[in-house]
Every structure is written in structure tokens, then in C-alpha cells.
Image (cartoon, grey):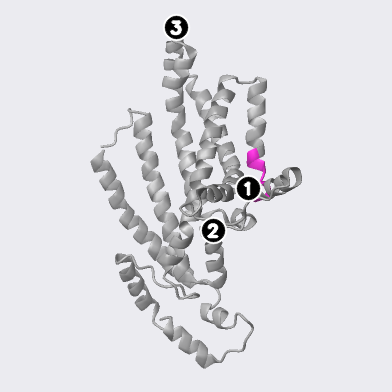
């Protein structure tokens, strides 16, 4: 197991190098000039000499090859450079907003797991009954309703029905835990509902397939109680595809909550990504892409380890 983890972590290095190289060159073909956009943001006329001087200050007057070498050398020292727009270190810009997106992703995942596994299991065990039909309607609704729209409905519903406006914005959990949970619970719920819908459908399908296996019929023939068959044999095997879905959705949530963050006025990674793309701040874009790549790689590693725990037949050698 230890050797497997070490090998997987070593594979992170070439993966990140490939992502860094691809992003570096792809971003350079983006239309627009970040220097022109920055200096003329307020509609002020700027001379060509000022543009050239600013480009030189930012190091953009160097050749692409020189910029690439500087960028890769910085990565070896965990230096992602400075934002071309604000001048702040990219690491500082990301770490200022990463805890917000990470907490929403964790809370949404917990909500999805606590909803999806029980509902998916009930739907499979009571197939073609009113319970199954109800769960399937709830799941399809979660897939059909956009998360940001559900977020707006939640806010309007709380104001209209209860006369209460949920806290909008972000407060650190270390400063005020209650205010932090009150602010992030509703965006996590709006995102977690769709998350739960995907996992519920996967849980139902996987459990129905497992329940048709020969070893399940053998256990029934031996007189094993249904709840024991379901808990000890069926659910562990049915959880394999569900874990995959949960892992991929979690990684997506780190940078994919752009509109939901806007609805709840949360300054997370998604909003930072949009701002960086709009401004053409490619050093910040590079750092954000690397962050998401690392997240996906680490999540895939955790999913593989969970596979081995759920199914001992999977050998990690």
C-alpha cells in the first residue's frame, strides 16, 4: 500500500509538468493584451511609451522561451509568480480564497452523501414502488434545476416565508463559527442538492446491479437476513461507482461554483478564475489551473485508496 501511494504521488510530478507546459503556451495565444487592458481600464488615454514601459516592468518584453524558463524555474521553488493585474503573489491571491471554496465543497459533499446513499438504497430496495418513484422524481429534479437558480429560490423563500435574510458573504470559521456556517450552509445546500441527485441515481443503479449477482442470491438461499445482505455484501460493492462520482464532483466544486458564488456574494476560486480570465491575467490563470489539476490528482488518489478499502479484491501492489 505504501509503495502504491508513493508511486502515485511521484506520478503527480510529470502530470503537473504537462499541465504547466500546456497552460503556459495555450494562454499565450489568448486574444488581447493584459497591459493595454490594465492601463486603459478607466478609459484613460495611455501613450505607447507607457505601455512599453509597463510591459518591460512585468517582464512581458522577454521572449516566450525566456518567460517559459523563468516560469518553470519558479515552479521548482513553489513560486507561481505575481499577478499581472494586482501585483500580488499568485499564491497569496489563491490562498485568500481557497479556504472558502474548499469549505463549500466539503459541506456540499457531506450533504450529498447523507442524502444520496440512504435515498439511493431505499429506491433500489423498494424498486417500482411509491418510494422508488418519489426518490427518482427528487433526483431528476436535482439534475434539472441549476444550482444558482435554486440558490436564488432559497434566498427569496427565506425572505418571503420567514422574513429572514440569510447572511450573505463570508466570515472565517475561526472568527465566528456560527456566522460562518450560517453563511455557507445555503450555498452548500444549493450545490449539494444537484450533487446528491447525481450520486442518488448512481447508487440506485449500482445497487440494483449488485443485487442481481450470484453471491447475493446464494446468501438469500442460505437464509441470511436481508439487512445483513444489503449492508455487508451489496452496499460495499455498489459504493465503488458512487465513490468515483463523489470524488469527481468534489474536485469540480473547487473551481466550478462561479454563478453560485455570485448569488451568495462569496469571493471564492470560481469568481477569481472569471476575473483573471476577463483581465487576461495569465500568471494567475496558470496558478488556478495548477491548483485544480492538483485537486483532481489528489482526489483520484483518495478514490483509488477507497476502492481497496471497499473491495479487498482490488490489490494495490
Question: SS class of the residue under badge 1?
Answer: helix
Element type where label 3 sits in the image:
loop
Mark 2 highlights which residue? 270
Judged by depth in the image, the label closer to the viewer, 1 or 3, is 1
Q: Is residue 145 magenta?
A: yes
Tell me: residue 314, above or below residue 77.
above
In the rendered structure, the answer to whether residue 202 lies left or right of residue 233 reads right
**Magenta part of the chain:** 142-150
| Residue 126 within the segment the image draws in magenta | no
Query: Residue 214 placed where, x, y %?
Result: 44, 16
Q: Give me the disc on residue 223.
A: 3
Earlier-in-chain disc, 1 versus 2: 1
Quarter of the image where the N terminus is located? top left
Kindly identify which residue carries mark 1. Answer: 147
Q: Is residue 297 visible?
A: yes
Residue 180 bears which disc, if any?
A: none
Secondary structure of the residue carrying tag 2 is helix
Amino acid at each position: 500500500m505504501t509503495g502504491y501511494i508513493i508511486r502515485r504521488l511521484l506520478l503527480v510530478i510529470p502530470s503537473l509538468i504537462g499541465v504547466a507546459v500546456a497552460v503556459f503556451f495555450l494562454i499565450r495565444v489568448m486574444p488581447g493584451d493584459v497591459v493595454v487592458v490594465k492601463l486603459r481600464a478607466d478609459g484613460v488615454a495611455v501613450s505607447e511609451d507607457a505601455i512599453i514601459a509597463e510591459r518591460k516592468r512585468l517582464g512581458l518584453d522577454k521572449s516566450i522561451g525566456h518567460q517559459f524558463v523563468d516560469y518553470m524555474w519558479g515552479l521548482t521553488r513553489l513560486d507561481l509568480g505575481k499577478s499581472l493585474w494586482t501585483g500580488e503573489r499568485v499564491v497569496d491571491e489563491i490562498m485568500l480564497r481557497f479556504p472558502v471554496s474548499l469549505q463549500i465543497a466539503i459541506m456540499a459533499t457531506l450533504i450529498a452523501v447523507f442524502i444520496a446513499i440512504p435515498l439511493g438504497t431505499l429506491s433500489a430496495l423498494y424498486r417500482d414502488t411509491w418510494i422508488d418513484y418519489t426518490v427518482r422524481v427528487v433526483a431528476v429534479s436535482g439534475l434539472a434545476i441549476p444550482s444558482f437558480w435554486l440558490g436564488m429560490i432559497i434566498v427569496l423563500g427565506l425572505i418571503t416565508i420567514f422574513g429572514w435574510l440569510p447572511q450573505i458573504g463570508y466570515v472565517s470559521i475561526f472568527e465566528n463559527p456560527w456566522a460562518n456556517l450560517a453563511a455557507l450552509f445555503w450555498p452548500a445546500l444549493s450545490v449539494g442538492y444537484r450533487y446528491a441527485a447525481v450520486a442518488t441515481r448512481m447508487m440506485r443503479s449500482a445497487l440494483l446491479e449488485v443485487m442481481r449477482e450470484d453471491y447475493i442470491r446464494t446468501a438469500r438461499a442460505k437464509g441470511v437476513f436481508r439487512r445483513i445482505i444489503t449492508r455487508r455484501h451489496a452496499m460495499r460493492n455498489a459504493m465503488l461507482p458512487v465513490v468515483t462520482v463523489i470524488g469527481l464532483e468534489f474536485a469540480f466544486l473547487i473551481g466550478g461554483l462561479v454563478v453560485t458564488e455570485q448569488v451568495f456574494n462569496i469571493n471564492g476560486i470560481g469568481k477569481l478564475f472569471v476575473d483573471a480570465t476577463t483581465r487576461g491575467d495569465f500568471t494567475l490563470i496558470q496558478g488556478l489551473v495548477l491548483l485544480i489539476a492538483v485537486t483532481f490528482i489528489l482526489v483520484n488518489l483518495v478514490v483509488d485508496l477507497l476502492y481497496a478499502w471497499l473491495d479487498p479484491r482490488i490489490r494495490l501492489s
